[in-house]
Image: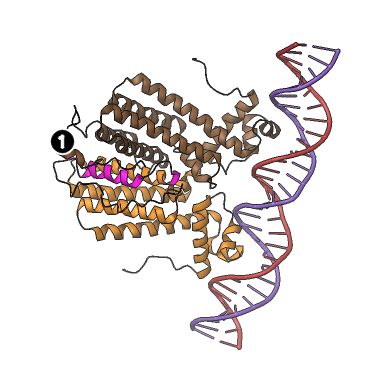
Chain colours: A orange, B brown, C purple, D red
Amino acid sequence: MLVETEIDWTPGARSVLDAASELFYARGLHAVGVEAIAERAGVTKKTLYDRFGSKDRLVVEYLAARDRRWRALLTERIEAAGPGAEQRLTALFAASHEWSRAEGSRGCAMVNAHAEIDDPAHPARALVVEQKRWMLGLFRDVAERAGVPAPHGAAKAVALLHEGALVSYGTGAFEGVFEAAQEAALLLIGGARPRRLPSSDGRTGAGAGRDGGAR
Amino acid sequence: MLVETEIDWTPGARSVLDAASELFYARGLHAVGVEAIAERAGVTKKTLYDRFGSKDRLVVEYLAARDRRWRALLTERIEAAGPGAEQRLTALFAASHEWSRAEGSRGCAMVNAHAEIDDPAHPARALVVEQKRWMLGLFRDVAERAGVPAPHGAAKAVALLHEGALVSYGTGAFEGVFEAAQEAALLLIGGARPRRLPSSDGRTGAGAGRDGGAR
DNA sequence: AGCGAGGTACACCGATCGGTATAGTCATGG
DNA sequence: CCATGACTATACCGATCGGTGTACCTCGCT
């Protein structure tokens, strides 16, 4: 129950998954060959195919594993933030920012993968969609906690803000995306009705916006 | 003046560009070979290479041509909408929605291309970034017209909303993304401040308070 | 008349793609 | 004791990748 729901991969499979995660995210699905993954993992192609069967299935497992990590981080941070809507929203955007900074600025892995998979029936597509809907659920919960008159619509707008921040951080087109998204989100969800915001004095919890400036 | 500013491609080059545009967008950069593009264009590979030199350069021309179409549509619609901030914002989101519907739901071609190009020095990356900054400029213009106290920050938030709507329309994770984005954008830009002069109304500090960002 | 630009048709290149096959090593546990 | 599972090593497969070379054709323009 309280244990990790991680699949019990063999050591070889695990290092393949790690290598695939790095390479797929950094270079793209089609740009990375199974040979390169196996080499990076310190494993033969045979092992890779014994564990995953095909490149397609490896792609799905890569996304699934990444999604698990992502959700674990978010739920942890949200729960630690307390029950308040503003607290949760702030924690959520801070976690996204932190994640993005740590992963390197290649944007959202789900969106990127979706862009490379043209087959609508590919299981990876469903995985991506499911994740985005889960995110929407998170925002809806926050909107409801805030008592926003139209929680569904507000949640959707905040989800779009978040999505935009994620991919814009990836392109590096402009700076301070998470801060801007968070501020707007707080305004949409916290400020849409007569209520005092906690210390409306800038510095909205995003910590020092110590964004990795190098672009 | 009313003439197209399109580069004077040869007929062969033009059909290659058309074919490339469809195939690259639908299937992805790496998934489409030059052979397939030439075939679709009704042209030999030789012609393709005589006109574009390499696949990389064809990719750049594909994005550049698409960007030209996109900007032409937007500027036309915005100018036709009149000088008001709300009118322009509405026209902009409507145009995006219309474009996305017409192109098929594969999301933003620029973002998708960016996801597939790992080399930061690739000229296509600069093209993508430039387009996103141009979009931000559009939104800033609107924010300034609306007399928002912190136009830069508000514009960034609206740009993120728009970005999120574009890619979310692509994933198809949820419905009504353009409507939701537009509504929130209007709220952020049109409704977040005193209709008239930017007085020092207390509540304004809550959200986009500090413009900050743009260093 | 002639020439160059824009083509077609097609053969060819080395490299890499995803995926398979065969053979053998090593550790664990019933 | 020995069978099974996890792995290495290596060779191989057909297909496709981006890209080049050669030869020939056919316009429009001077």
> Which residue sits furthest front?
B215
Say above or below: A26 vs B31.
below
- State the residue in front, A184 or B91: A184
Residue type, mark 1 in image: Asp
Instruction: Check if residue A180 falls in the magenta segment.
Output: yes
Residue B125: horizontal and vertical position, in percent? 51, 41
Magenta segment, which residues?
A: A170-196
The number of discs equals 1
Comparing B36 with A157, the one in front is: A157
User: Which residue, given by chain and number where applicable, does mark 1 sit on?
Assistant: B201
Residue C4 sits in quarter: top right
From the viewer's perspective, tell me whether residue D7 is left or right of residue B84.
right
Residue at x 42% of width, y 32% of height: B134
Query: Which quadrant is the N terminus of chain A positioned in?
Result: bottom left
Q: Is residue A210 left or right of residue A47?
A: left
Q: Where is residue A123 in the image (x, y as percent from the top left)?
A: 46, 51
- Note whether residue B68 is visible: yes
Give residue D5's position: percent from left, percent from top. Answer: 53, 73
Element type at mark 1: loop
